Image (tube, rainbow, N blue to C red):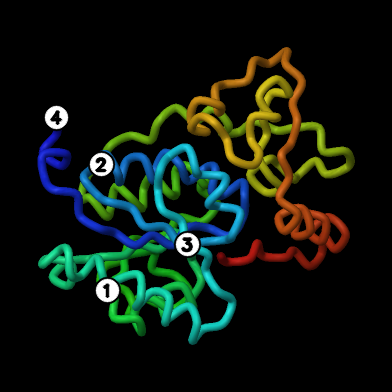
Amino acid sequence: MSAHQSLAARPLIVRIRNFIGDVVLLIPALERLQAAGYELHLVGKPWAKSLLEAYGWPVTKYPNKFAERRALLKTLAEPLRARDPSFDQRVNAITFATSFSSALDMRTAGLKPFGFAVEGRSLLLKRSARIVYGEHAIDSYWRLVNAFLGEDKPAPAAALRGRTCDLGQRPNCTHANVGVCLPRSRASSVGNRPQRPLSAVLQPAQPHQKCQVVKDPHRQRDCDRTRRYPSKPRRLRHA
């Protein structure tokens, strides 16, 4: 048992990403936070509850309006604060989303958030980490957790890192931009109410296996626009 695991579980509010592919790639980082002794309380899109059901993490739907988001975070924190006397004495929230609003929501709800120093939001974060643009999502999420825990552990072998799929006439669009690339034999396992953790599904695909993309429509739209207007590259949205 590690030193982290020997401690009582500490509640941590976690703002996950808005896109299916990003949330799947976020799983190793979430598992690491849990192994480090944190009791995760996730907020995100409605489909995330079903997608992550096998892990047992509570997932609360995140509203669209600022006032509703702030109220939700306050409501979510109230019982955690009552249960953990140290809740307000430490960083008690982490945002994997990189938008300004994700930090603003947490700060105005009375939380002490941790996240990447980007979008001019450093003053809203209790602590922050430097972002590295162009880094693979798995490495980025893992590095954020490294900074949060004050450790320097190497990222796990990424089954999906660098793997491209046949996406028609979109040579610059990899699975990381439009969705999750899985062998066809396992793609059907990613759906509503999975019976086992996705980490058991995301095993390395062999070179000879045909690949199927579990698409995220928002990433697909960004990728399509980048190809349609190459002279005006579109930044992938912060979420």
Which quarter of the rendering shows the N terminus?
top left
Residue 117: percent from left, percent from top: 38, 68
Amino acid type at mark 2: Asp
Residue 224 placement, left or right of 173? right
Q: Which residue is mark 2?
A: 152
Gap between marks 3 and 4 measured at Cα: 30 Å
Gap between marks 2 and 3 measured at Cα: 30 Å
Q: Is residue 163 visible?
A: yes
* Residue at figure coordinates x 71%, y 50% from the top left: 216
> Is there CB contact under 8 Å for labels 1 and 4?
no
> Is there CB contact under 8 Å for labels 1 and 2?
no
Q: Which residue is mark 4?
A: 1
Residue 155: percent from left, percent from top: 38, 35
Gap between marks 1 and 2 measured at Cα: 32 Å
- Looking at the rendered structure, the secondary structure element under dot 3 is strand
Q: Marks 1 and 4: which is nearer the front?
A: 1
Gap between marks 1 and 3 measured at Cα: 15 Å
User: Which class describes the residues within 10 Å of circle 2: few (<14), some (14-19), or many (20+)?
Assistant: few
Q: Marks 2 and 4: which is nearer the front?
A: 4
Gap between marks 2 and 4 measured at Cα: 19 Å
Q: Earlier in the sequence, mark 1 or mark 4?
A: 4
Q: Which residue is mark 3?
A: 60
